[in-house]
Image: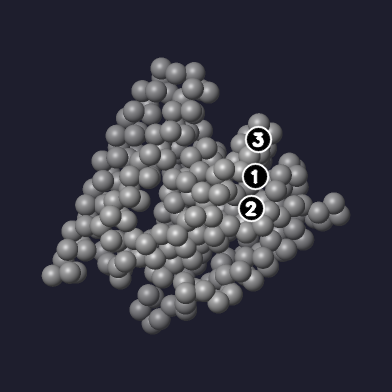
Amino acid sequence: MKSLWEWLLLILGFIYWAVAGLSVTLIANILTLLLPPRYAIVCGHFILPKVFQLFIGYLKITGLLILEDTDLKALARQQGAAIIAPNHLALWDAVFIIAQIPEAVCIIKGAILRNPFLGGGARLAGYIPNDSISKMLKLAALRLQTKEKLLMFPEGTRTKSAAQWLNPLKGGVALLAKRTKVPVVPVFIRSNTRFFEKGWPLYRKPVFPLKISITVGEPVIFGKYETAQTFSQRLEQIYIAELASPHPLRRQAVDANGR
């Protein structure tokens, strides 16, 4: 009976996501036509986080999710430009961060901007696609110059199941830090589940409640004599040292069933 009830709650969550996503896309398309870009972006940074906050609230109220994200609330209060750089465990990592830091500008895959459930809100909020690295770096640098916070996953994609702690870091964060000299704030996401990990089929129900912890590390500054490669290596070691440390939600090896 408990399992059936959890399935029902999970399906209702998916329905909310589908309805909310399509509704936001419709509203976003209208606002994009009616408003100047700077006002449209303000609306996007208001609407999209509210949708995420309601979704997270639903998961908490139903007991499907236990979330510890106090550090994100403190990070949201900090002023000035920053590159927020989380490890990327699951499909919905950005949802938890943007819910607490609504003004963050997210670097996303171009395909998401064309997705009917996610694309409208992302376009309205002025999120930056990573289809072209050179164009992405240019646009991201411009946003950082105006003291905005940028959300960028340094792994470039979700952590592979076989990876012990995280994938080798891509060079985007390091190149952006080198160009702008803006601090990189590592964010460490831990979970008791592989739910929404790359390759997780939606028909496989996870064990509830899902437990997720999000903590924030000290800002990392690009060194005077560093290269992008050495900075990226230093940043990767910071993630490994933190994620490998003892913690109730420390990443576990997958079993024979990929769980």
The reply to whether residue 152 is visible in this rendering is no
Does residue 135 lie above or below 204 as drawn? above
Label 2 packing within 10 angstroms: few (<14), some (14-19), many (20+): many
In this view, which residue lies farthest toward the right? 225
Q: CA distance from mark 3 to mark 2?
A: 14 Å
Q: Residue at x 57, y 48 (%)?
A: 75
Label 1 packing within 10 angstroms: few (<14), some (14-19), many (20+): many
Find numbered disc 2 in the image and state the secondary structure of the residue it sits on: strand
Q: Is residue 244 left or right of residue 65?
A: right
- Residue 188, horizontal then vertical, whole percent: 55, 61
Q: Give amino acid for label 2.
A: Val
Of the numbered discs 3 and 2, the one sitting upstream in the chain is: 3
Query: Residue 128, labelled with which disc?
Result: none
According to the picture, the residue beneath numbered tag 3 turns out to be 147
Q: Are marks 1 and 2 in contact (CB under 8 Å)?
A: yes
Q: Give amino acid for label 1.
A: Ala
> Looking at this view, is 103 or 119 the one in front?
103
- Say which quadrant the N terminus sits in: bottom left
Find numbered disc 3 in the image and state the secondary structure of the residue it sits on: loop
Of the numbered discs 1 and 3, the one sitting upstream in the chain is: 1
Q: Give amino acid for label 3.
A: Lys
- Residue 214, horizontal then vertical, whole percent: 50, 59
The reply to whether residue 253 is visible in this rendering is yes
According to the picture, the residue beneath numbered tag 2 turns out to be 185
User: In which quadrant of the rendered view does residue 35 lie?
Assistant: top left
User: In which quadrant of the rendered view does residue 54 lie?
Assistant: top left
